Amino acid sequence: MAQHRIAVIRGDGIGPEVIEEALKALAAAEQRFGLSLAYAEFPWGSDYYFKHGRMMDADALDELAGFDTILFGAVGHPDIQDHVTLNGLLLPMRRGFDQYVCHRPSVLYAGVESPLRGKEAGDIDMVVVRENTEGEYANVGGFQYAGFPDEVALQTAVFTRRGIERVVRYAFELARARNGKKRVASITKSNAQGYGMVLWDRVFDEVAAGYPDIETESLLVDAACMNFIRRPESFDVVVASNLFGDILTDIAAIVTGSMGLAASGNINPERRFPSTFEPVHGSAPDIVGRGIANPCAAAFSAAMMMRHLGETEAADAIDTAVRSVLRDGAALTPDLGGKATTTQVGDAIAAGVGG
Ligand code: NAD
Ligand code: IPM
Ligand code: MN
């Protein structure tokens, strides 16, 4: 039996609360399917920063490199500037492990109400494939005349042919493999951003030519935001730059019911480095410590992680268990209109995984 080595970074805010429940689901799957999951916990995040002046160890990526996958909660603390927390932990991991695909499914599940009128379960079923290592998030820029009245800040987006090509190809392969509408939508803003996004459009068209079986559309990001709300059922696979993918996946999460349902994988498809699985949501300081965070996104992320590890039965069992908790409706957190606690939902999921 293969052993899977999993690094766990619970992080800040509701991160530890939801990861606890994801780990329960994994433990139930481990027992039911006779798996061997070896965990190592890393206490990184804002508390670590308050003690050590950094979000994670200086050689953190070396420490993590030997793991098969990483399960991550969230980081972000009201008393630390977000660019410090996020550039101190999550973003270096995405870049350093070349996790160039951010794979973010959004499904309207049975038992969950969309804020959009007239949407039934299954009507919305899409995956946003977000470029995850470059674009607007390339850590390139600087300050000039810092602190002076004429201070200047430069923030440079970096788009490379290689970077675009590989993520677009992933999107097309996914559309082919999915039992969906066989459609890929590409999102840019090439009417205003005349270099990087123009390259993106060109590379998208070149890659698309190799997939005549897949229907395509190219949308400007403002229109895409509108259409995620106006006609979300028309999307199958969506491929977008780093920043646009970030924004679109919050919209996709909320039109399918809650931030607390949206799962995500930061993936290095070649498996040269570990991939990181995490909910789309953040540390949610507004609800931390109240025991009401929805753990479903973390559990769905754990299911994605098991699928990545080749443990299809375990992945399916976790996925099915979360879906049936949602369908059943007896244990739902307040974001979904229920009264259950994080722990009660996690226990219901784990019981379902146990079979
Ligand atoms: P957020 O996702 O933390 O919260 C947005 C809203 O959704 C809040 O009202 C919150 O209560 C609700 N929400 C989020 N997750 C929920 C859950 N599981 N169950 C129920 N409700 C949930 O976004 P934000 O408020 O913009 O950011 C808070 C902090 O998190 C910031 O510091 C931000 O930088 C950070 N952040 C981190 C990550 C990450 O680590 N991956 C992602 C997003 C934001
Ligand atoms: C996400 C988050 C991060 C991002 C932030 C916290 C840097 O919003 O994972 O969606 O923008 O990628
Ligand atoms: Mn985001």
Image: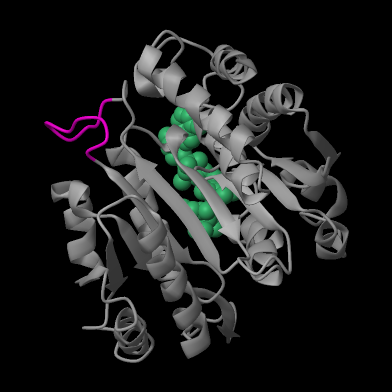
Relative to 162, does residue 244 appear above or below in the rendering?
Answer: above
Q: Is residue 257 left or right of residue 279?
A: left
What sort of colour scheme is used for the picture?
one colour
| Residue at image coords 60%, 66% | 269
Relative to 181, does residue 242 appear above or below in the rendering?
Answer: below
Q: Position of residue 192 (x, y in %)?
A: 24, 83
Q: Is residue 76 visible?
A: no
The answer to which of 41 and 215 lies nearer the viewer is: 215
Image quadrant in which the N terminus is located: top right
The residues colored magenta run: 113-123
Image quadrant in which the C terminus is located: top right
Q: Is residue 136 magenta?
A: no
Relative to 184, does residue 231 appear above or below in the rendering?
Answer: above
Quarter of the image where one finds residue 130: bottom left
Q: Position of residue 328 (x, y in %)?
A: 39, 12
The answer to which of 194 and 316 lies nearer the viewer is: 316
Q: Position of residue 332 (x, y in %)?
A: 43, 16
| Residue at image coords 65%, 69% | 270
Q: Is residue 116 left or right of residue 246?
A: left
| Residue at image coords 54%, 34% | 316
The answer to which of 328 and 285 lies nearer the viewer is: 328
| Residue at image coords 72%, 49% | 70
Q: Position of residue 69 (x, y in %)?
A: 72, 51
Dominant SS type (magenta): loop
The answer to which of 27 and 84 lies nearer the viewer is: 27
